[in-house]
């Protein structure tokens, strides 16, 4: 199917969460042997999963973290502490099972799906999903990062991958990414879509110093000036100051929502994708499960704009999907509590 058509069809087919299932979950949670509400966010997650899936005890055991990899022309401006070659090198590391996300995914029983959506190198590995839209974005400080058509193609890649995984029985997804320089377009998206000031929206990424921070803020101001993205048109903003892997993750989120599957959102970069997805399809927001609060400056305000409250605070600032994969067991624990705890009646415990 043509990319634009797949995107439009996907957005139009996302359904609101199932209110009856959410109500049933709320009722069930209140019958369990605990003071009402005492399991806090675990209860919130259980209700949300019921609303997403329409079931009180869905089988979420097949789960995948989709790691989208792409390069960034804006690296030419010196916005990262690391060189751009690290992107393809880390892709090989993911494929060989040695990155942080691989370890955490093995620990939590998730599969890692690594996608080359825009790495500026020829890559080949039997485990790689090769869906390159372009050899990295262009430098957004001087012109658009990509064309609108390329952005739409990248979003469609994400949708298509999740549709394929859902067909193979995957029922829970996490967002992951790799792309040296990608905190810069993520901050630019936050500024362009919400009007957040550049000082608040820009952080140290892989660890740039004060001079690097000044440069990064200037580059973002320059990019917004050069491109003048239209805040009312999320695809325009995504194309002009976004990234290929960010666009791919927008597709992953929309794809999860249309398949009625929860999608656990990782840190700063993934959340920038989540913001774009929620602007393209407001009904997709209830399918997003926040994972952790990244140390990256700007993540808190970004989460607030989407209306998400992170579950974990681990002082992590890595990306790759690491924080999202860490939240999988919390989601699973929430569902086990709802389904395995005794009720006041069954356990013979007195109510107030
Ligand atoms: C070895 C290494 C592994 C990573 N894994 C994720 N990132 C993270 O850092 C990058 C974003 O930071 P910035 O915008 O400052 O370049 C992204 O690739 C992100 O996934 C990594 C970065 C490095 C160096
Ligand atoms: O929160 C993240 O996703 C993040 C933060 C800094 C660098 N890379 C990723």
Image (cartoon, rainbow, N blue to C red):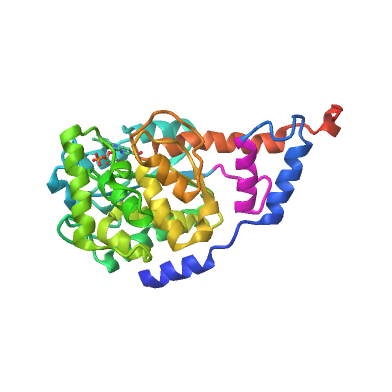
Specify whether residue 228 is in view: yes
Quadrant where ligand 2 appears: top left
At x 56%, y 38%, the residue is 331
Q: Quadrant of the C terminus?
A: top right
Q: How many badges with numbers are in the image?
A: 0
Give the percent coordinates (x, y) of residue 158.
39, 57
Res 1 visible: no
Residue 13 located within the stretch drawn in magenta: no
270 lies above or below 203: below
**Which one is nearer the viewer's eye here, 222 or 13?**
222
Position of 89 relative to 168 (above/below): above
Examine the image and state in which quarter residue 78 appears: top left
Point out the image quarter for the N terminus.
bottom left
Residue 337 point in image, percent of width and height: 67, 34
Q: Is residue 95 left or right of residue 309?
A: left
Magenta stretch in the rendered image: 41-61
In the rendered image, the vertical position of residue 114 relative to residue 224, given as above or below: above
Question: Which residue appears at 63% of the width and 52% of the height?
Answer: 51
Q: Can you give x and y, in whole percent of width and height, for residue 132 in the image?
A: 26, 57
- x, y percentage for residue 176? 37, 44
């Amino acid at each position: 199917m043509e990319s634009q058509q797949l995107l439009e069809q996907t957005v139009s087919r996302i359904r609101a969460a199932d209110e009856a299932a959410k109500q049933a979950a709320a009722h069930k949670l209140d019958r369990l042997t605990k003071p009402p509400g005492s399991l806090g966010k675990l209860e919130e997650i259980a209700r949300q999963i019921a609303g997403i899936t329409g079931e009180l005890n869905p089988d979420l055991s097949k789960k995948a973290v989709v790691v989208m990899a792409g390069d960034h022309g804006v690296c030419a401006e010196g916005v990262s502490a690391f060189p751009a070659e690290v992107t393809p090198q880390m892709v090989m590391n993911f494929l060989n099972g040695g990155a942080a996300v691989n370890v955490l995914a093995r620990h939590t029983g998730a599969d890692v799906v690594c996608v080359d959506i825009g790495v500026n190198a020829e890559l080949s590995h039997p485990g790689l999903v090769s869906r390159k839209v372009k050899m990295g974005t262009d430098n957004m400080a001087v012109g658009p990062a990509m064309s609108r058509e390329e952005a739409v193609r990248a979003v469609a890649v994400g949708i298509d991958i999740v549709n394929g995984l859902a067909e193979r029985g995957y029922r829970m997804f996490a967002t992951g990414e790799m792309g040296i320089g990608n905190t810069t377009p993520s901050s630019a998206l936050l500024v362009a879509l919400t009007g957040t000031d550049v000082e608040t929206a820009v952080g140290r990424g892989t660890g740039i110093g004060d001079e690097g921070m000044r440069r990064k803020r200037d580059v973002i101001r320059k990019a917004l000036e050069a491109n003048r993205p239209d805040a009312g048109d999320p695809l325009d903003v995504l194309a002009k100051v976004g990234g290929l892997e960010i666009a791919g993750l927008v597709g992953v989120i929309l794809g999860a929502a249309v398949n009625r599957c929860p999608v656990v959102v990782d840190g700063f970069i993934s959340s920038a994708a989540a913001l774009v997805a929620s602007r393209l399809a407001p009904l997709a927001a209830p399918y997003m499960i926040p994972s952790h609060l990244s140390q990256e400056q700007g993540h808190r305000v970004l989460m607030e704009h989407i209306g998400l409250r992170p579950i974990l605070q681990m002082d992590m600032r890595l990306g790759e999907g690491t924080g999202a994969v860490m939240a999988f067991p919390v989601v699973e624990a929430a569902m086990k509590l709802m389904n395995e705890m005794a009720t006041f009646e069954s356990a013979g415990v007195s109510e107030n």
